Image (spheres, helix red, strand yellow):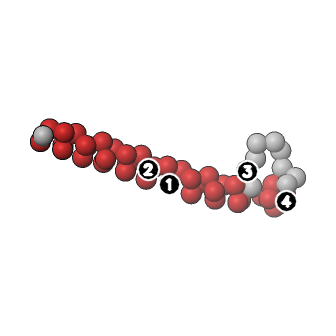
Amino acid sequence: MKRTDIDAGRGQVGELTGAERDELRRLRRENQGARQERAMLRKAAAFFAKET
C-alpha cells in the first residue's frame, strides 16, 4: 500500500517511484559497463604505447 502511494506521487520527499528505481538500476548498470569499457581501453592504449 505504501509503494502504491509513492508511485502515485503521495510519498515523502526523497522516496523514489517504481519507475525511478528502475531507471536508477538501469543507469547504474550502464555506468558500470562504461567504467569497465574505459578500463579496458586504458589497458589497450598502454599495451600499444609500449610496443612502439
Camera-side residue: 13 or 4?
Answer: 13
Q: Assign a secondary structure to mark 4.
A: loop
Residue 14, x across and y down, in percent: 76, 42
CA–CA distance between discs 2 and 4? 33 Å
CA–CA distance between discs 2 and 3? 24 Å
CA–CA distance between discs 4 and 3? 11 Å
CA–CA distance between discs 3 and 1? 19 Å
Camera-side residue: 22 or 52?
Answer: 52
Q: Is residue 16 left or right of residue 11?
A: left
Q: Assign a secondary structure to mark 2.
A: helix
Whichever of labels 4 and 1 marks the residue nearer the N terminus, that label is: 4
Mark 3 is on which residue type?
Leu
Mark 1 is on which residue type?
Glu
Taking the spot 44% from the left edge, 50% from the top edge, the residue there is 34
Camera-side residue: 47 or 30?
Answer: 47
On residue 16, which mark appears? Answer: 3
Nearer the observer: mark 4 or 1; the answer is: 1
User: Relative to 25, is 51 above or below?
Assistant: above
On residue 30, which mark appears? Answer: 1
CA–CA distance between discs 1 and 2? 6 Å
Nearer the observer: mark 2 or 3; the answer is: 2
Residue 39, x across and y down, in percent: 33, 44
User: Relative to 46, is 18 above or below?
Assistant: below
On residue 8, which mark appears? Answer: 4
Which of the 4 image quarters holds residue 9? bottom right
On residue 34, which mark appears? Answer: 2
Mark 2 is on which residue type?
Ala
Q: Assign a secondary structure to mark 1.
A: helix
